[in-house]
Image: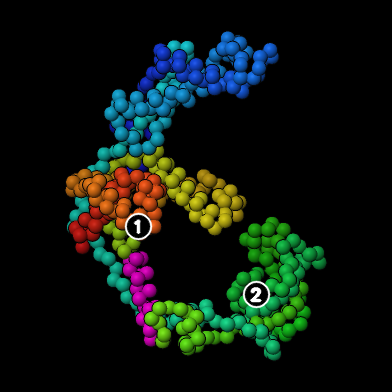
Amino acid sequence: MAKKETNKKVENKKDVVIKIEGQDWIDAVDAAFEEKRKDVTVSGFRKGKVPRNIYEKNFGKESLYMAAVDNVVQVAYVKALEESKLVPVVQPKVDITNISDEGVEFTFTIITKPSVEIKKYKGLKVKKDKVEVTQEEIDHEMAHLLERYGEVRVKEKGKLENGNIAVIDFEGFKDGVAFDGGKGENYELEIGSNTFIPGFEEQLVGMKNGEERDINVTFPEEYPAENLKGAPVVFKVKLNEIKEKVQREFDEELFEDLAMEGVNSKEELEKEIKANIEAQKEVDAENRYVDSLLDAVAKNVEVDIPEEMVDEEVERLLGRYSQQLQMQGVSLDLYYQLTRTTEADLKAQLEKEGYKNVLYRLMLEEIANLEKMEVSEEEANKQADELAEKYNMAKDEFLKAFGGIEMIQYDMEIRKVVDFLKEENK
């Protein structure tokens, strides 16, 4: 069974020691000095013109070492990979184990791909759900469509009923004192939507235009404002106007509003809705099928997954989640405030998904290796041409956004493995 490696020593985690010394280190420290002295002011010298001996007398030679390290760490890392012949799967951990006038010594902890053993990945007989669309589902969507395109008009006579929209002024009082956030003017509230505190909307039913009424309710115990949790309050409400929704009919005017090509009757609309529901169900069924298939294969996998691989995947998921929030106008910091959570809480939630993603990736790569599945650069370039045209992008721009032709090859290879598993597990 696949498991995550904790802190035990494993074969795919290697320490590689690299020294930068001699003239290479002298040049790095010299470069660090030239960069540092640009912003240094010493009495008697113009800014950026302090001599080396005066700089070292005032700030110490050691102050240049860390800047010099920044200049050579990438060179040292490349050297570590060349000498060790290792292929890392995550960014390495780097420690400075020694530093002096003579040079600097780095220890790179390089994690390579763990060995993966798959006991079985064929003949698992995973089945895809059959997709069916019921008349009830079609009717529900048709009714929803009528509601979405329904008209709203002012109700001149009569009382406020469930389903009507009440246009109200209101102000809330606790112990006779108005509280923050409890006031609104010409607020449109659909009765029955359960938007307000439990009991509020029900007490408005039966009001007439211009009527005023005191509404007594109690805030829920889980209400976020501490001063209102479980508190009984009174809302003074005035009903300014009543609006009612007018149900549309499947007539010519509605079909004009829908503007759906080839749909000019109720029967044609039903066919279109059925096709849309069916298409979405097919997508959902396919996603469930692939996930069930990969889960079934994963149960036959033996691999020790380094926690660093999971941590890196969690960081990637966190970045994606942050982008999704930003598209909604919410920052991660605001999200933490609203949900009363921390980054550590969110990472803990994402860890299971992160672990599964890494496991599936390693598993699929191993099957590609076992089945000798490869995608040529020519195939990848053809795919890149098609996708660039599809998204109306220049090919070089598309490749840059996708991560290069190698990522296209990798993506195609993984999809080829998934298609192979589908065929072998029907």
The residue under the point 34% across, 25% down is: 80
Q: Secondary structure at mark 2?
A: strand
Asked if one can make out residue 84 in the rendered structure from this viewpoint, the answer is yes
| Front residue of this view, candidates 303 and 160 | 160
Instruction: Tell me: residue 280, above or below residue 27.
Output: below
- For residue 279: magenta? yes
- Assign the magenta stretch its main secondary structure: helix
What's drawn in magenta, residue-wise?
A: 267-285
Q: Is residue 47 left or right of residue 235?
A: left
Mark 2 Cα within 10 Å, few/some/many (few <14, many 20+)? Answer: some
Q: Percent position (x, y) of residue 77?
A: 38, 27
Q: Which residue is mark 1?
A: 389
- Residue reaching furthest right? 176
**Up-down relation of residue 21 to residue 419 (above or below):** above
- Horizontal and vertical percent for residue 157? 69, 90
Which residue in the structure is indicated by mark 2? 189
Q: Is residue 371 above or below residue 147?
A: above
Task: Look at 65% across and 75% down and name the residue there.
Answer: 189
